[in-house]
Image: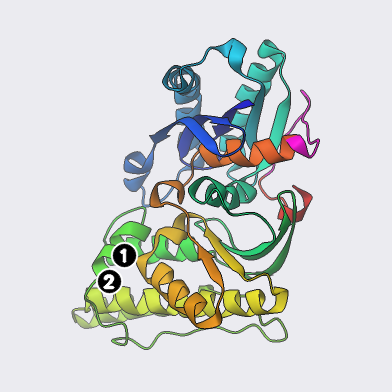
Amino acid sequence: MKILAVESSCDETAVAVVENGRTVLSDVIASQADMHATYGGVVPEIASRKHVEAISGLAEEALARAGITRADVDAVAVTYAPGLIGAVLVGVNFAKSAAYALQKPLVPVHHVRGHIAANYITHPDLEPPFVCLCVSGGNTMIVDVRDYTDMSILGATRDDAAGECFDKVARVLGIGYPGGAPMDKLAQGGDDKRYDLPRAHVHDAPLDMSFSGLKTAVLNLAHNASQKGEELDLPGLAASFGAAVSDTLVPRTMEAARQMGYGKVAVAGGVAANSRLRADLERACQKSGNKLFLPALSLCGDNAAMIGCQGYYEFLAGKRGGLDLNAYATRDISLG
């Protein structure tokens, strides 16, 4: 079964062709990162307009790279939530038009479910149930993946997403946008104990997280240093920040894994590419006896292959969208 998949939830326009859920025939992406870097973050209106400009050509390219024609497409899958509402609407409307024109089923896919599915592409042997840490610029949560389409949230951030904090801290430190990769690179060789940064705990919710205090602590450090004319140890600060994020995420993920008892832990989302987080999770899983599944670095960020993969399982579960399918800025992962 060949699925034409569309992703446009933020600042990457992506279209892919995925066969039987786990074989990626093509995956093409048009990134807007350089354009939004001028503003230090994503400008929603610009993102939406760029999606409109790119999406049709990307679909043609995805089909060509996959070596198939429109007639070979069996279904169309699309991210319909969550994300920047204008950006998501572009993908949803294109996918509805494509499904209508091709007379093929339309399959709505939750964006975070798609990130989880990136692990199925990297690890063909991975099957539910497992615990998955989903951590990106827009979402940070620990998910109980009971089956391919049966999921619930075990813990989540109460405020900022971890990836959002990476971006905002990187902007204040003047090291560019998006902030994840530059912060990771800067942290290499830095002293992760150079700065004493907070690790928040949520009372009566041991699996929940909070990152707003950590972000504020770094911003205050930077502003105080600027006012006093002092120089910050940037590698040390980046390393200390990365350690604080990892120290927040890893223990909660491992506690969730202990509670569920599946013996399998996966990671998903853009921050899954962070080297400190990956290393800390590997050590924690080795110590606890859990098997760790990490997505390929190329599949950590937003892409359409993951949407095609999850779309396959949503299709098998009977999920369909009609011409009245809408886009949503927020949507509980358990609702699909």
Decide if residue 190 is on the left or right side of residue 210. left
Residue at 51% x, 30% y is 16
At label 1, the amino acid type is Met
At label 2, the amino acid type is Ala
**Residue 160 pos. (x, y %):** 55, 66
Q: Is residue 320 above or below residue 283?
A: above
- Alpha-carbon distance for marks 1 and 2? 6 Å
- Main SS of residues in magenta: loop
Crowd around label 1: few <14 · some 14–19 · many ≥20 (10 Å): many
Q: Which residue is mark 2?
A: 187
Q: Which residue is mark 1?
A: 183
**In the structure shown, which secondary structural element does the residue marked by tag 2 occupy?**
helix
**Residue 138 pos. (x, y %):** 55, 55
Query: Which span is picked out in magenta?
Result: 316-328
Residue at 46% x, 60% y is 272
Q: What's the coloring here? A: rainbow
**In the structure shown, which secondary structural element does the residue marked by tag 1 occupy?**
helix
Asked if disc 1 and disc 2 are in contact, CB closer than 8 Å, the reply is: yes
Q: Is residue 326 magenta?
A: yes
Decide if residue 287 is on the left or right side of residue 107. left
